[in-house]
Image (cartoon, rainbow, N blue to C red):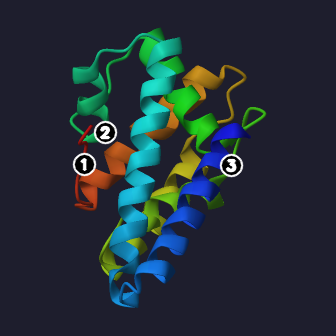
């Protein structure tokens, strides 16, 4: 819940900044994307403080270079997805996953791919009582079909 407030505050602050600075509407998406990236970095680092994951591993995951199969990484992923509102009380909010992923994609073609990827993952990812395993399964599915559909890799700049 706290992270949802941070995301909303970041987006509200961005909108206020844009209005105050008279930034053209066409630049709005870039500003929002940057703010969302900043929130993603903050969440990743906060979760790494609880579930010790190396920065190089975080970069590997965020740039879609692979996901190590170990419990710390799985629980770190769970923490990130919970704080971003994608996992709530052990349930996946697929709509939220799609919305957040679309916010960082530039092309309409890639946004259609995200819809396709998560429709597949919704069917393939079984509900798991272990939230760490659930988060890992979601990420593995997204990476697998993201590669197949040639979705651009993620970015990571601290």
Residue shown at 55% from the left, 63% from the top: 13
| Label located before the other in sequence (2 or 3) | 3
Q: Are marks 2 and 1 in contact (CB under 8 Å)?
A: yes
Q: Residues within 10 Å of mark 3 (few under 14, many from 20)?
A: few
Residue occupying the point 55% across, 45% down = 124
In the displayed structure, 18 sits above or below 157; it is: below
Along the line of sight, the residue nearer the viewer: 126 or 73: 73
Front-lying residue, 107 or 39: 39
Residue at the spot x=65%, y=25% of the render? Answer: 131
Q: Residues within 10 Å of mark 2 (few under 14, many from 20)?
A: some
**115 to 64, vertically: above or below:** below
The residue indicated by pointer 3 is 5
Image quarter of residue 22:
bottom left
Q: Nearer the viewer, residue 41 or 68?
A: 41
How far, Cα to Cα, is label 2 from label 3?
A: 22 Å
Judge whether 113 appears above or below 87 on screen.
Answer: below
Relative image position of residue 45 (x, y in whole percent):
42, 26
Q: Secondary structure at mark 1?
A: loop
Which residue position holds label 2?
62
Examine the rendering and report whether any part of residue 69 can be seen: yes
Question: Which image quarter: residue 141?
Answer: top left
Q: Residue at x 27, y 21 (%)?
A: 55
In the image, is 8 to the left or to the right of 60? right
Determine the secondary structure under disc 3: helix
Q: Which residue is mark 1?
A: 155
């Amino acid at each position: 819940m706290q992270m949802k407030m941070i995301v909303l505050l970041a987006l509200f602050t961005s909108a206020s900044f844009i209005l105050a600075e008279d930034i053209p509407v066409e630049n709005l998406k870039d500003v929002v994307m940057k703010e969302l990236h900043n929130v993603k970095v903050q969440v990743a680092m906060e979760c790494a403080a609880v579930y010790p994951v190396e920065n190089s591993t975080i970069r590997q995951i965020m740039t879609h270079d692979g996901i190590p199969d170990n419990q710390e990484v799985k629980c770190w992923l769970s923490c990130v997805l919970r704080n971003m509102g994608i996992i709530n009380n052990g349930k996946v909010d697929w709509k939220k996953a799609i919305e957040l992923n679309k916010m960082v994609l530039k092309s309409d073609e890639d946004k259609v791919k995200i819809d396709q990827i998560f429709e597949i993952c919704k069917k393939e990812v079984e509900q798991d009582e272990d939230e760490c395993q659930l988060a890992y399964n979601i990420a593995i599915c997204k990476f697998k079909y993201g590669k197949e559909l040639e979705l651009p890799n993620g970015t990571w700049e601290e």
